């Protein structure tokens, strides 16, 4: 997207604007330096804490034979849903993306009989000003962990989850930049320790962002 934007500006204005203050090489040097390594260790610690609270995977049991073709796409078209999401988000002081993420996590957990959901939203990792125009792949999986409270009275409603979901989502996005090799090693170790494959296998990507 950044490259296409710059090409359009170059054609229309004769200039793509100032260069990005960082290059991929600068980013790699930071990631392999002391500060970058500390950040990766902290991010992976967040993953370990979150995964230890959740089931090893969200979909442990096969419920049907594999279909052909293997990968399917479904689409829900609704004019009411965007308005409802915006209304709930405004009423509870959270983002619309958090509302959708929380709903997806709650549905997965309830549908699979889990009290805790672990979902991997896609993080762009471009919050830092120096990275916003960097032509490089920065997105990685974040970890969002949501615990469904026990509802003994039957009076719980979906919006009860949002107060805790908002900080949980922020924590996940802040811990979404890490060494992929370290991430692989972490999941392999946790798999050995728990005796079952540890991986949520449940992703969320808000394409509106």
Image (tube, rainbow, N blue to C red):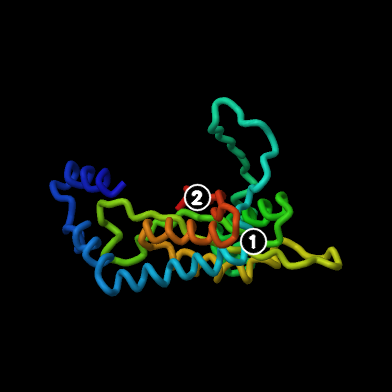
* Left or right: 69 as drawn, with respect to 10: right
Residue at 68% x, 52% y is: 107
- In the figure, is residue 8 to the left or right of 195? left
Q: Which mark is residue 133?
A: none
Closer-to-camera residue (174/66): 66
Residue 64 percent across, percent down from the top left: 68, 34
- What residue is shown with label 2? 205
Q: Total of numbered circles in the picture? A: 2
- Does 195 sit above or below residue 33? above
Residue depicted at 50% across the width and 51% down the height: 206
Few, some or many residues within 10 Å of mark 2 (<14, 14–19, 20+): some
User: Where residue 173 appears, x then y in whole percent?
Assistant: 46, 64
Q: Is residue 75 or residue 168 the one in the foreground?
A: 168
Q: Position of residue 59 (x, y in %)?
A: 64, 47
In this view, the residue farthest toward the left is 14
User: In the rendered image, is residue 199 in sight?
Assistant: yes
User: Disc 2 to disc 1, how far (Cα)?
Assistant: 19 Å
| Precedes in sequence: disc 2 or disc 1 | 1
Q: Residue at x 45, y 53 (%)?
A: 209
Residue 203 is situated, as x and y percent measured from the top left of the image, at 53, 50
Residue 35 falls in which quadrant of the image? bottom left
Above or below 61: residue 166: below
Residue placed farthest to the top in the image? 68
Above or below, 162 relative to 135: below
The reply to whether residue 86 is in sight is no
Q: Residue at x 55, y 49 (%)?
A: 201
Provide the residue designation for mark 1.
88
Question: Would residue 42 be found to the left or right of residue 28 on screen?
Answer: right
Quarter occupied by residue 105: bottom right
Q: Secondary structure at mark 1?
A: helix
């Amino acid at each position: 997207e950044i490259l296409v934007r710059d090409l359009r500006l170059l054609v229309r204005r004769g200039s793509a604007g100032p260069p990005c203050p960082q290059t991929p090489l600068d980013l790699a040097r930071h990631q392999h330096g002391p500060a970058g390594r500390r950040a990766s260790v902290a991010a992976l610690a967040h993953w370990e804490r979150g995964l230890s609270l959740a089931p090893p995977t969200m979909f442990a049991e096969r419920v049907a034979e594999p279909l052909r073709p293997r990968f399917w796409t479904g689409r829900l078209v609704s004019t009411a849903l965007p308005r409802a999401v915006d209304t709930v988000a405004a009423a509870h002081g959270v983002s619309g993306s958090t509302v959708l993420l929380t709903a997806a996590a709650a549905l997965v957990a309830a549908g699979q009989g889990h009290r805790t959901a672990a979902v991997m939203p896609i993080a762009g990792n471009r919050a830092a000003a120096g990275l916003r125009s960097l032509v490089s792949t920065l997105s990685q999986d974040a970890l969002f962990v949501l615990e469904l409270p026990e509802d003994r009275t039957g009076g719980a409603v979906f919006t009860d989850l949002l107060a805790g979901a908002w900080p949980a989502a922020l924590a996940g996005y802040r811990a979404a930049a890490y060494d992929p090799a370290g991430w692989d090693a972490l999941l392999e170790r946790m798999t050995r320790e728990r005796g079952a494959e540890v991986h949520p296998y449940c992703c969320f990507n808000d394409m509106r962002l």
